[in-house]
Image: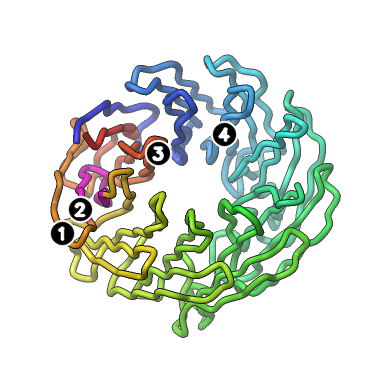
Amino acid sequence: MRTVFCKQFGEPYNEFSRVIETSDGSIVAVGGGSKGIIVKLDSQGELVFTRSTGKVAQYNDVLIDVSGAIVAVGGGTISSGNSTITKLTSTGDVVFDKAFGSGTGGYFNRVVEDTNSGGYVAAGTDGSRPARARVAGFTSTGNLTFDRTFGTSVEFFDVTYGRSGAIVAVGGTNGTFEGQATIAILNRVGTVAFSQSQGAAAGWYRAVNFKSDILTFGGGAEVSDASPRLTRFLDDGTVVFDQQLATAPGTVVSVIETSKGDFGVVTDLRGRSSLVRVEANGKVSVDKQFDGSLYAVAASREGTLSAAGASTDGSGVAVTVDTNGKVQTFTADAPLGAAVISSAGVLYAATLDGSTLVGYRYDGVVTTINTYSPDGLPTPSKKARLTNLTLTSDGAGAIASAAAMGTFDGAPWLYKVSFD
């Protein structure tokens, strides 16, 4: 592996919430903590621009629209600040920067583009007492077209479009996996077609990218005996399947749809974790459990699933499940935070502190390819925390970010590596 760049931006103790790659290989990262920040770099890490504002404490999501403009959303907290949407040109000029509320709280978690109208839809929570889940529509110039709220003490974690063009927002109770699971379906002008505030997930829903139906996931609760579940909806609210993923209490941590049309799921079973493959009809075909914690699930272009985490003894663990159901497990000296599979078929796992990338071949032989520690990341490891790991669009490299922890007061890092 080789370093493409490793740089720091923003305020001490802040972090990057989302990092994306544009069509020309540029990188856009958004985040904050005390001040919202938007950073754009070219493919080699040269700074194109950085924008930071005290208007918003943190940006939570970002997209590149069809015109190449950058649209970021975020806000304050449950009790202070305002929901915010900001649009910049590709060179960083402000198109609009709008906040909604009276400073009593609220934020947007996700934003999507309406490619028909050129507008945007954002979802999160408002600043009312108690807070309500919020979904709002905007024109391409930032004018509000609709603003809808749902539930009590809930927020929307994600928003997307169904196959008919309907807007689907999903979420659950603020700050806990207990309580209401909320899903709302609206038409493009914001008229509510369907809403449900207590569903099969029994705690919360989150949406992911999908190819045909609406896929939401949630399940279980942190305290009650509810078990993790995977629920698939059509965009008229019809349930395609509602699959319990374990008999033990727990929650779903992460889910992804593969190129084969099935799903990879990571669950937390309170001291144990599992990597599960679920077929398109809801049938569980693989269920591999581990002592310890697994984090976000990823999938290769061929459909192989991967996840990474930490064993109960403090060491790292990474696991793959190929399309034939073959499971392979790899170990590391330090806890792992995320894993991706390159276009060359190598599993790359990042340590939980973001300071090291380790490569493993999964062709039947466990082989450490390399260990990479970006210059500038602090040691010991407890002084940093991995916040993002994603493949580059060509699958030949990775982009990652890490945030300072403990007594180390550094600004967040953004780095890129090539797997050559």
Q: Where is residue 266 drawn, in percent x and y?
A: 42, 65
Q: In this rendering, does residue 396 appear at all?
A: yes
Q: Which residue is mark 3?
A: 15
Question: Magenta stretch containing residue 255, yes or no?
Answer: no
Which amino acid, mark 3?
Answer: Glu
Determine the secondary structure under disc 2.
strand
Mark linked to residue 63 = 4
Q: Nearer the viewer, residue 327 or 267?
A: 327
From this view, report whether residue 26 is shown above or below residue 111. Answer: above
Q: Where is residue 67 drawn, in percent x and y?
A: 63, 22
Which stretch appears magenta?
346-361
Residue drawn at x 30%, y 73% as measured from the top left: 290
Labels 4 and 3 touching (C-beta < 8 A) = no
Labels 1 and 2 touching (C-beta < 8 A) = yes
Q: Nearer the viewer, residue 358 or 300?
A: 300
Q: Where is residue 63 drawn, in percent x and y?
A: 57, 34
Mark 2 Cα-neighbour bin, 10 Å: few <14, some 14–19, many ≥20 = many
